Every structure is written in C-alpha cells, then in structure tokens.
Amino acid sequence: MNNLPLLRASALLIAALACLSLAPGVVAPQAGAVTGLYRNETFGLSIILPDGWTGEEQEDSRPLLQVRGAIPGGEAVADVWALPRDGEASAQTWLGVQTADYGETLASNSYVVEGADSAYQALIAREDAAGREFTELWTSAVRGSQVFLVRTTTLANLWTGAADTAGAFAASLRLFEPMPFGAARSDSLFQYWGEIVTIDPALTQSSPADIVGAVFSGLVRLGADLEIVPDLAATWERSPDGLTYTFAIDANARFHDGRAVTAADFKYSWERALRPDTGSPTAMTYLGDIVGAREMSAGAADSVSGVEAVDSRTLRVTIDAPRSYFLYKLAYPTAYVVDHANVERGGEAWTDAPNGTGPFKLKRWLKDELLVLERNDAWHGGTPALAHAVYRIFAGYPMQMYERGEIDLTGVGRFDIDRARDPANALNTHLREGAALCTFYLGFNVTIPPFDDPKVRQALALAAEVDKEIAVSRLGLDERAAGILPPGMPGHNAALEPFAFDPAAARRLLAESRYGGAENMPVITSYASGGAMHWAWEHHLGLEVEAVSIFEFGDRLDRLERKELGVFRGGWCADYPDPQNFLDILFRTGSAQNHFAYANPEVDALLDAAAVHPGQARRHDLYRQAERLILDDWVAVPLWHSRDFVLVRPYVKGYELTPIGVAQLHNVSIEREAGE
C-alpha cells in the first residue's frame, strides 16, 4: 500500500509533463497570478520566477505551480512539484527513474539546493507524437520523505536563448521546514495517514480515534479506561424498565460556527443515517435498537418514533428492549450529530467543509495528500492544547518518516519491531505496546459454492498452518486465537483450544463432502491474501487456488458488504467492551456486518437472550454458547489476536495506547524540551 501513492503521483507526473504542448493558453495566467517570489509554507519551499514570467498555483497541488514566460523567439513553460519519495532513493536515483523512458539525457550532474538532503539536475531532449522536439531542464531535490521537482521546457530550437533563465529559475529553489496551512511543529501533532474513505459520521467505518472523532462528537464517548463519559450530553437518566433514556444536552455545546446544538439536531442526524438513500453501512448496527429505526431504514417511515426532541436541550430515546450496552453504541461515529444546513447545502461534498462539534475543525484537506485540523477554541470540553493536527496522507514510509523526525507518532509494522524493541536502539524508549481487542479470522460466505458445504470450510481450516504463519510471517508477535472473543473482552472463553493443523483429516473431510474429494473440487477463488495459506491448500489438499487481491480498502469493504467474496481474511476490533459487539454484529442473521451470509436460528435465539438479560454472568454464558455454535459451523475460523505497537515522541504528552480506539486528540499536547 505504501508504494501505491508514489506510483499514482509518478504516473500523473509523466502524463502531465508529456501533455504540455507549449500552445498558447495551456497555462494561462489568471487572477491572482504568481510573479517574483513564490513561497509555499505548506510544503516548505520557495522559488523566484524570472522577470516577466507568471505562475498559477494549482488547487490540487499537482503540480504546486504552473509557470509560463517569454524567452527569445517564443515562450517557456515550467512546473514545480512536491511528491512522495520512494524509500531511500536519492535525488539522482529518483530523477533517473522518472526520465528513463521519457527522453534522451543530454547532460546531468549533482546539484546543490539549500535545505535539501540531495539534489540532481539533468538536461533532457524529447520528441512528442507530432514530431516536435523539446529541451527540458529537470532539477530534483530530496528532503526527508519528499521529492521536489522544478522542470522547464522549451522548443529545442529556442533552448539556447532560454538556458540561462531556466538555470537561474532552478537555482532559486530553497527548501525549509514546512508549516502546513500554518501548523508549526512546536504546538502541532504530525502523523502519517492512509486512505480516508470518508469522514461522514453516517458512512464511516472508522473508530472515534480517527479524524471523524476529532471533528464530530456525540452524546457520549468512551474514555481511556473504556467507560462511558459525557460528551455533548451533560447528564442522562435511564427509566426503571431500561427502555427510555433522557439526555440533557450540555448548555455549552456548539457547532463550529457557534450555533447551539439542539435535540432536533440529533433527531435529524440519526434519521439521516437511517434513511435508505444515505446508504449507511452501520446505521442499523448502532442505532437499530431504537424504536422505529427498523421501519425508517426499510423506507416504511419518514421519522424514527423512538427519538423525541422534547425541547431544545432534551432528547428522549426509546429502545425496543432493555440493553445494557446501548450507551456504548452511542459512542460510535454513526450516532454523532451533524448540522442539517451544512449537510443539505454542501451536497455530496459537504464533508469538505464540515460544521462539526468536536474539539478540532477541518482547516484544509488536499485529497490523498494532506489534511490539517485546527483546534476549536470554543469546544464545550475546554480548549485543546494542540494548535493543529496534521495528517500526511500516503506521504512515504511511516517508520522512515518517524526516524527522520517528520512525524511525531506512528504504528510499527512487524518487520520493524525488532529494531524498535532493541534496547541499543534510540527508538526503544519511544515504543509502547499493548494487546488490542481484535480477532483476525478466515471467513467464508456460506452461500457461495463450494463454501456452502461445512465440510469444505472445515477442511480448508485444518489444512492451514496457522502456528507456522504466526511464527514466520507474523514473527511471533500475535497470539493464536481459539475463539472469536479476544482475551480481555468480557465473556472471553479461556477454555477454548485452537484447532490443530491436520491435513489428513482435511483430506477425509473433502472426501466426505458433496464433492467427494479434491479432484472434483472447483477452483478456489480466494481473497484471503495469504500466500502461505494458498500454498497449504494446494500442497496438502491438491486444490487449485486462484488468489485475488483487492488493494483499495474502500473497494474491499464494498465487496464484503455486497457479500461477493467466497473466502477471505477479515478482522474485527472492538468498538466497545461487550461481547455483543463481536458476536451479534458479525453473526446475527441479516446484520450489515455479517459478511458471511450466515444464518443460524439457534445462534440468533442465544444472542436475543443475551442482549436483554440483566445479569452479566448469565449474559456472558449465553454469548459463550453462541460462540461455540459459530465455531462448530466453521464460518469464521479464528487465526490470531493482534498486539499494537506505537512509537511516540517523548514530547507528545497525554497520548494513551488503549485496547479500543478512543477519541483522545483533545488530551494531547506538545511539550518539547530544549533541543527536541
């Protein structure tokens, strides 16, 4: 995944450079055209345009700046780019890769750019499809995880008259510490970030620890100890029968534009999430216990009868049965409040300028590149210490960025963990690790042949060398899973034993299946993304496996929700500390997150009983019974429980590594000592 953004950027770069025609109007100056000194604080660079040259800053930063100017006999065009660096590639290596199939290198040499780790320059000759000849001066400069490119192009017969001007333009490039949209390292948190599918609370499947939990908020939230604490609700009462909750909204709760949050805002937000045309993948999961939610989700009602705005600051919610975990569900982003006018006015792009209620506001979002939050000084919970939170999207390799001092916090992949755990390595004192309430599994859609045969599912499981994969591929960092519920989760069954690797039994099961043996089995189309597992199925069972990869996270989610994947690897990390969050959400018949198309009336009955039983010990026993049935059906085969490894700069205060992702950006501060 880390290589993908660079490939995209490189392809875009080559396509853009090749398409420049030098025809009048290609880079036409507009209002606000750049002349003279161009300084970009966000990317940390400056460059001086030659006299008479004008530039236009590009809104999507691809490139940062397009320039054109007069030269003897004609005109020149130029571009200034900022792109992710490919690993440890030097400026020379990077430039060589970009120009390898682009044109003929006439001359090249090392170069010096102030503030760069390395720089290189090359003179390139190329010819376009119409046979026109061009000369181009490329100047690349590397700083940390970024590569900067300045490129000037003229028609080949005009280059001599333009060479000095183009050279002076390139020589004026300076690099300095970036301040993305005003965010300084002294009081802002910088992080690497991956794909942002959406920050719409109704559509996201991210945790409150994600960006959505910093910009938006709900009635309640999970604290670092995983207990429910007030957020936009100052207080609440639960009726004696456990069916009605009455929330008093904090008098200081405000949207980012200053408007007071009302009970009607929550009613609108929850009903919007439940509307069929919204397409929320999580609305029924987290709001489905409310009376009338099911009818609205089905399009049979225009409102949710169980949500009542009693007055501007009082919200009454009625649920269909007394459920001890109901408040936990309201801490998930689906239950966050949104501003009706903001959503309706902004259309599909409303989240580009969201009017949230969280401790941070969205300041700027350059898609697939950079997102900057700024603190909300009027937040009802008090002014956050951080001035900004900066998310550098697909900006390079997180570990290298951390070691170079470009980011303040990052997860540690398994191939870097030995280095971080080494007491002789300076990173060791930055490392935090802990168990996550997560379970990873091999999943089967039980309606897609041949996985609709339970003997086939069991055979594939028994042929998988899970212990070896944990030891070798996962470097022994994960704990072998025996059940669905992870250790630390209430209701976890410590008496369960992991299934054993048994290829002989697996072959017998295939022989007993309706296929009568491996020789009659169809090709296994697998989305399990595990080379070792595919090898085991081929080697131990004699099956033919077609491995299919889905690289985009959003695409994978969409296909799982459409129940298109027959066999796949999945994982579930707790949203709240209750077994219902695993067993009911993943395995109840018809649940949106039941990607297995699994339906077992006996399991559903146990889940129903556990959901409403007042005694926790009995609830947990009922969930263990349901878990045992699910395991016996071989619908989701537990593989391992993961651990989290995070590097945190010593000057980052207030960050806690929790087994469930919770909103905590409002607790974080930057407190640097001299020299840090």
Image: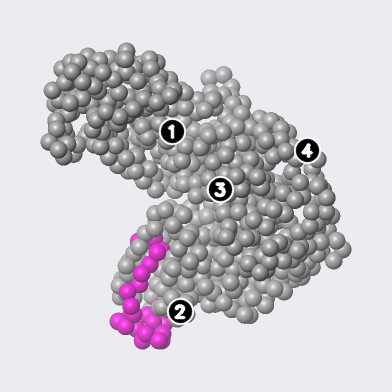
Rendered image quadrant of residue 155: top left
Q: Nearer the viewer, mark 4 or mark 3?
A: 3
Report the amino acid beneath label 1: Glu
Report the amino acid beneath label 3: Gly
Q: Residue 288 appears at what percent x and percent y?
A: 67, 64
Q: Residue 380 appears at what percent x and percent y?
A: 74, 37
Q: Residues within 10 Å of mark 4 (few under 14, many from 20)?
A: some
Q: Nearer the viewer, mark 4 or mark 1?
A: 1
Is 291 on the left or on the right of 562, as rendered?
A: right
Secondary structure of the residue carrying tag 2 is loop
Q: Residue 22 appears at what percent x and percent y?
A: 24, 29
Position above or below: 390 against 477: above
Q: What residue is shown with label 2?
A: 452
Q: What residue is shown with label 3?
A: 347
Q: What residue is shown with label 1?
A: 59
Q: CA distance from mark 2 to mark 3?
A: 42 Å
Q: Are marks 2 and 4 in contact (CB under 8 Å)?
A: no
Residue at horizontal 44 percent and vertical 41 percent from the top: 368
Among the two numbered marks 2 and 1 on one chain, the one whose residue lies closer to the N terminus? 1
Q: Magenta region: which residues?
A: 505-531
Q: Residue 183 appears at what percent x and percent y?
A: 54, 27
Report the amino acid beneath label 2: Asp
Q: Nearer the viewer, mark 3 or mark 1?
A: 3
Position above or below: 404 against 646: above
Rendered image quadrant of residue 536: bottom left
* Residue, far right: 240
Q: Residues within 10 Å of mark 1 (few under 14, many from 20)?
A: few
Q: CA distance from mark 2 to mark 1?
A: 51 Å
